[in-house]
Amino acid sequence: MEKKCDVYTSEDISRFVDTELSSNQCRAFEHHLSLCSECSRLFGQYKGLSLAFSRHTHKTAMGIATLHLEHKLEQKIQCPEKKLYQNISGLFGKNLYLKLAGIAAVVMIGFFSFDPTLLGTPSGPSAIINSVDTEYTSVMIIETQKEKHTIIWFSEET
Amino acid sequence: MAGFETTAHKDTEQDLVERLKKGQKQAFNQLVSSYQERLFKLAYGITLDREDSVEVVQDVFLSVHHHIQTFRQDSTLATWLRRITLHHCLNWKRKWKRRFKWHHRSLEQENDFEPAQENFNDPELLFREKQLEGALMKEIQALPEKLRLVFVLNAIEGLSYDEIAETLNIKKGTVSSRLHLARKSLINSLELNEK
């Protein structure tokens, strides 16, 4: 059976941990802590939670901080999306008919690839069953919508 | 002395903001190196995912780069960055690409961090510390977002109740009760796990 202190609530202790009590309340509570084992236990637990969480995030952040963020941001700031758009728009030069033909081809390919009855091939994946990441490879098991195929996707980074 | 340091800090920050507004590349790099660790901690505390927090922090700095002209300096640069980070973290979950994220990284893997130097010679203590942190992170992940936000701002950023209330636009009493509830809930769950 858990004992409870009659003088202070657990919210008072939580506020004491954060030094949010007035200086008078603080002094009184400090004195009480030396007498009440329940409050002392809870104080230790509350303090420990914040410390453990802070320690864990600090260690994780230290690991992340070595990722040369400045360099990555510099690349992103140079607007790669814009360049990509410029490349695509300039793909067929200035010829209007070629551009229209290109758009029509993209629409046709999209139409056939989304309707499996036209080409007799299974449609796109509907669910990812499982995936595994290792340092060099990635494997993904996918279920397709109608044919219930299981596809194993595998890649190896060089 | 403290006042002098504060004034000096303000001057440095003022100078940094002015240089950022002029579009100086060096100023932007200075901003990134000064704040990245702090923002990573905050973003990781909320997302609890290394990759997500990297993406969020990158987006925060890009956002700062694009919108620095709108920064009126009503608050400090750190406060402004914190607000942007919180905004990005909360929106991150709603982004479409998250739904298509297929790779899986377990929390156990996340917890595979380097041992603390001070406990390096005591494997038992190190093991217990790792166990506690692993269990704690799982419970924090299960906390409702409202409670977790308050807990993170308190534990990671070390903000006072007034500052948390201002950041999240809630009452000081609400901060106190949410923080208390978060702690109580975490302790209860951890104790239940131990039994």
Image (spheres, coloured by chain):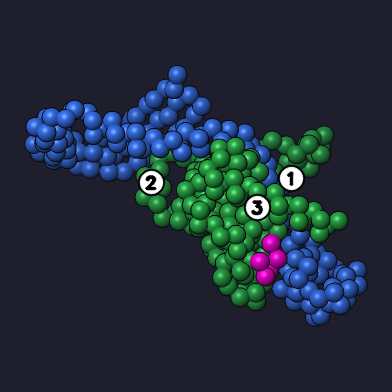
Chain colours: A blue, B green
Return the disc, 1 or 3, that comes first in the chain's sequence: 3
**Residue B134 visible:** no
* Kind of residue sitting beneath label 3: Gln
Q: Is residue B118 left or right of residue A85?
A: right
Q: Is residue B111 above or below residue B163?
A: above
Q: Quadrant of residue A4?
A: bottom right
Disc number placed over residue B24 in the picture, else none: none
Q: Quadrant of residue B109?
A: top right
State which region is magenta: B159-163
**Residue A95 visible:** yes
- Check disc 2 and report the residue beneath it: B97
- Check disc 3 and report the residue beneath it: B14
Crowding around mark 3 (Cα neighbors within 10 Å: few <14, some 14 to 19, many 20+) is some
Q: Is B65 part of what is drawn in magenta?
A: no
The residue shown at (32%, 33%) is A84
- Check disc 1 and report the residue beneath it: B128
The residue shown at (71%, 73%) is A11
Q: x%, y% of residue A44?
A: 79, 61
Q: CA distance from mark 1 to mark 3?
A: 46 Å
Q: x%, y% of residue A131?
A: 41, 36
Chain letter of the residue carrying label 1: B
Could you tell me which quadrant the N terminus of chain A lies in?
Answer: bottom right
Return the disc, 3 or 2, that comes first in the chain's sequence: 3
Helix, strand or loop for disc 1: helix
Instruction: Please tell me if label 3 and label 2 are on a single chain.
Output: yes
* Kind of residue sitting beneath label 2: Lys
* Kind of residue sitting beneath label 1: Arg
Helix, strand or loop for disc 3: helix
The secondary structure making up most of the magenta span is helix
Q: x%, y% of residue A79?
A: 40, 37
Chain letter of the residue carrying label 2: B
Q: Is residue B72 above or below residue B18?
A: below
